[in-house]
Amino acid sequence: MDSWSEILFVFGALFVELVALFLIVGFLATLINRRVGNERLQRWLGGGRFAAPVKGILLGSITPFCSCSTIPVLVGLVRAGTPFAATTGFLIASPLLNPIILGIVALLFGWQVMLGYAAVTFVFTIIIALAWSRLGLERYVKKVRVQGGWNADQPWAGLRAEARPAWQQTVSAFRPMVLPMLIGISVGAVIYGAIPQSFLTSVAGPGVLLAVPIAAIIGIPLYIRMESALPVGLALSSAGMGVGPIFALLIGGAGASIPEVSMLTGIFKPQLVAAFVGSILAVAMTGGLVIPLIV
């Protein structure tokens, strides 16, 4: 009974948090996109082969978002016609390279480890963005349709006049995300309430040959939010889990989650969703194997 109470509590807390995050962040992102303009946003995030993903990563690195709150901004970027490589860089970097995550890594392991983590994640995010573009995965992005709002060609009319149509567009963009969000939160809450810490250390602790890939795979359904990453990392470290598996777990949990993957189905076709999950797993496993060697 206690476990079910915990699962229901986690479900309710996640649902309220994600709805609030999507609506608030989506509303602000819509206003910013409207004020900046689609053409200017495309120019800022465009450029050559390497410039676009680097700009997307830089945008993601200054936005303290968890994996799920990245989605409403991603919707705005897709709707604005932002270059695909820049959008990819933002999607992966926003939850993995933002100031809060870097601060948590520095508190857990020191600034040298944080720099190594940032370098590995930055390089592999560029590689993923270039690979997705090379493979032509942009064709698996759905057309994001919204109702209401204004004509993008109309000039900025002031915050008061723009707020109402911006809210209409935010709500319209949110509607197709509701069912995937509910499904993802339900599965995530059950897994979160059902997997004890002792299980994590038993399958990905010291002496386990495949600790890093196992930790990376387990991390994704756990949905490790930023505020819980520090206590989770400290607890696993004190329980004897090595640096590599901890990093794999944190990258997998922060970079993707069942709620986020479910919400992405409203923007991406299955092929691109699968590429996203595979890419996060690759970053998590690579980080878990490489970071302990370079710090």
Image: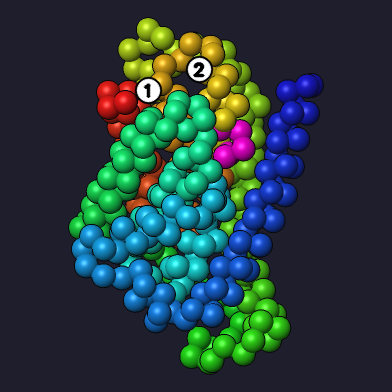
Q: Amino acid at mark 1?
A: Gly
* Percent position of residue 32, x then y: 55, 73
Which circle marks residue 8 in the picture?
Answer: none
Report the coloring of the rendering.
rainbow
Query: What residue do we see at 58% from left, 39% from top?
Result: 225
Identify the residue position indicated by label 2 in the image.
237
Describe residue 257's horizontal placement relative to residue 283 as left or right: right
In this picture, which residue range is highlighted in magenta? 225-229
In the image, residue 182 sits, relative to residue 164, either above or below, namely above
* Closer to the camera in the image, 15 or 70: 70
Q: Residue at x 34, y 76 (%)?
A: 43
From the viewer's perspective, is 134 left or right of 181? left
For label 2, count other residues whose C-alpha is less than 10 Å away and answer few (under 14), some (14-19) or many (20+): some
Give the residue at x 62% y 58%.
22
Instruction: Pick the residue in front: 182 or 30.
Output: 30
Image quarter hosting the N terminus: top right
Q: Which residue is mark 1?
A: 244
Residue 53 is situated, as x and y percent measured from the top left of the image, at 31, 59
Residue 56 location, x and y as percent?
37, 60
Does 262 appear above or below 51? above
Q: Position of residue 285 (x, y in %)?
A: 33, 30
In the rendered image of this protein, does residue 31 appear above or below residue 135?
Answer: below
Quick check: is 282 in the magenta stretch?
Answer: no
Q: CA distance from mark 2 to mark 1?
A: 11 Å
Q: Residues within 10 Å of mark 1 (few under 14, many from 20)?
A: many
Q: Residue at x 54, y 51 (%)?
A: 64
Q: Is residue 20 visible?
A: yes
Report the magenta stretch's main SS: helix
